[in-house]
Image (cartoon, rainbow, N blue to C red):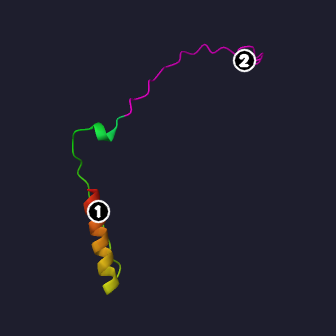
């Protein structure tokens, strides 16, 4: 037997009017034919030599993504 809640003795019918709000259609960003302005923030915490390569790696990474 499938219970659908219609036969529930504690169920009360609502007399309030309900507002149906349809969902917005999902937009695929690959379908958009426009460009976005973006900004990347790279940070190097010290002046040590090892950090110079870290900055270069961050710059390379974000250059490929934008």
Q: Position of residue 49 (x, y in %)?
A: 31, 86
Secondary structure of the residue carrying numbered label 1: helix
Based on the picture, tell me whether residue 11 belongs to the magenta stretch: yes
Residue 63 versus residue 33 in the image, above or below? below
| Magenta span: chief secondary structure | loop
Outermost residue to the bottom: 48
Left or right of 28, for residue 37: left
Q: 56 or 23: nearer the eye?
A: 56
Q: Position of residue 30 (x, y in %)?
A: 30, 41
Specify few, some or many for label 2: CA neighbours under 10 Å numbering under 14, 14-19, or 20 or more: few
**What segment is highlighted magenta in the picture?**
1-26
**From what the image shows, is residue 48 above or below residue 10?**
below
Q: Describe residue 33's horizontal placement relative to residue 14 as left or right.
A: left
- On residue 62, the disc is 1
Marking on residue 11: 2
Q: Earlier in the sequence, mark 2 or mark 1?
A: 2
- Left or right of 50? Residue 35 is left
Q: Is residue 39 left or right of residue 20?
A: left
| Residue in the image at 32% along x and 41% along y | 29
Is any part of residue 51 visible from this angle? yes
Front residue of 29 and 24 = 29
- Residue at 25% x, 56% y is 66
């Amino acid at each position: 037997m499938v219970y659908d809640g219609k036969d529930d003795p504690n169920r009360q019918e609502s007399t309030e009017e309900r507002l149906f709000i349809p969902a917005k259609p999902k937009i695929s960003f690959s379908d958009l034919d426009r460009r976005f302005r973006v900004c990347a923030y790279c940070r190097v915490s010290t002046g040590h030599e090892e950090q110079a390569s870290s900055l270069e790696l961050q710059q390379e990474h974000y250059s490929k993504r934008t």
